[in-house]
Image (cartoon, rainbow, N blue to C red):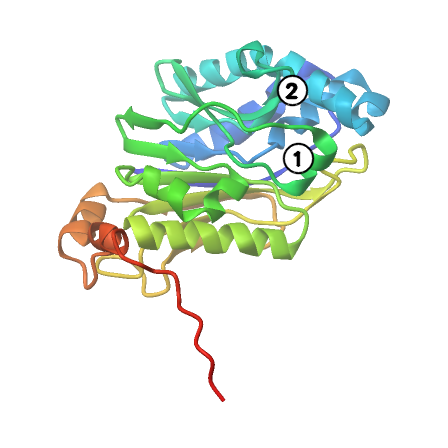
Amino acid sequence: MKVAAAAYPMDFIASFGAYEEKLTKWVSEAAEAGADLLVFPEYGAMELATLAGREAAMDLEASLRAVSDRVPEADDLHATLARRYGVHILAASAPVFDANLGDRPVNRARFFAPDGSMGHQDKQIMTRFEREEWGVIGGGPLHLFDTALGRIGILICYDGEFPLLGRAMAEADLLLVPSCTEALTGYSRVRIGAMARALENQCVTVMSSTVGSCDWSYAVDENTGMGGIFGPPDTGFPATGVIAEGSLNVPGWTYAEVDLERIAHVRKDGVVLNRRHWDEQSGRDRIAALRKLG
């Protein structure tokens, strides 16, 4: 299969029609390049807040509600595009008010198949900004999606920095890591996490990023990142673990070919077998004893 990871700039949008035109251009470009799986970034949907005006987009609480209100329309558009172009699309995540989960929004990425069907994944662990200033909460459980492209899991940004969340996705062939990071430090943390999850699970991780400045938002005003596709630095994969990567802060798609047979092979007969040996960590006293020297 061919995967496409976005470095996605958010815009001040004049109308939903303009958003439809923008998203169609992005999806059509990737599909015409032969991509089967398109991965948009975390919080890329915040540009929908601009449809409520600059004042609403700049207000933390108002922006959450403005985006959540537009998610059903955005979902219909993504489902239509997935059908039209015959691709799987991980839509840019959005704050969603879900009455089943409480009175605060979750950070939700929605995943669309070529038949137009949809699943979703909520972020599990919130960053300090999300929990202390924005009031976004952890959502529903982790899911593993069984698709025509293989088994796919999603770890949204900060979630990708936690090995036990990654381990819960041990049966995934691909882990999608949509991200939204303000500075190079944040991008680096998520990238290192994505590469570590590929190493531990002997799988492929696909990281997407928001890029550029948004003077209409306090929440996503500065964005640093690029697309990247990573694998275990082992049999059948690049020695660096980097299958493909874009250029920092340059909008566009990063593409890579992914072969499920290579994933199966490295899990069965790699130089090391991290995924198989994970459980050898358990059942042992791994807390280091404090010893005085000198």
Numbered-mark total:
2
Q: Is residue 42 left or right of residue 153?
A: right
Residue 130 image label: 1
Specify the quadrant of the image occupied by residue 269: bottom left
Q: Residue at x 55, y 49 (%)?
A: 226
Q: Amino acid at mark 1?
A: Glu
From this viewpoint, is residue 247 visible? no
Quadrant of image for the N terminus: top left
Q: Nearer the viewer, residue 158 or 87?
A: 158
Residue located 35% across and 50% down the image: 198
The answer for how far apart the CA atoms under marks 2 and 1 are is 11 Å
Q: Are marks 2 and 1 in contact (CB under 8 Å)?
A: no
SS at badge 1: helix
**Mark 1 crowdedness (10 Å alpha carbons): few <14, some 14-19, many ≥20:** some
Residue type, mark 2 in image: Arg
Check the image and report above or below for 139 versus 176: above
Q: Check the image and report above or below for 45 versus 262.
A: above
Q: Pick the residue in front: 135 or 48.
A: 135
From the viewer's side, name the closer residue of 53 and 65: 65
Residue projecting furthest to the left? 269
Which residue was labeled with disc 2? 104
Secondary structure beneath disc 2? loop
Q: Earlier in the sequence, mark 2 or mark 1?
A: 2
Q: Looking at the image, which residue is at 58% across and 10% down? A: 99
Q: Is residue 281 visible?
A: yes
* Mark 2 nearby-residue class (10 Å; few <14, some 14–19, many ≥20): some
Q: Is residue 210 above or below residue 15?
A: below
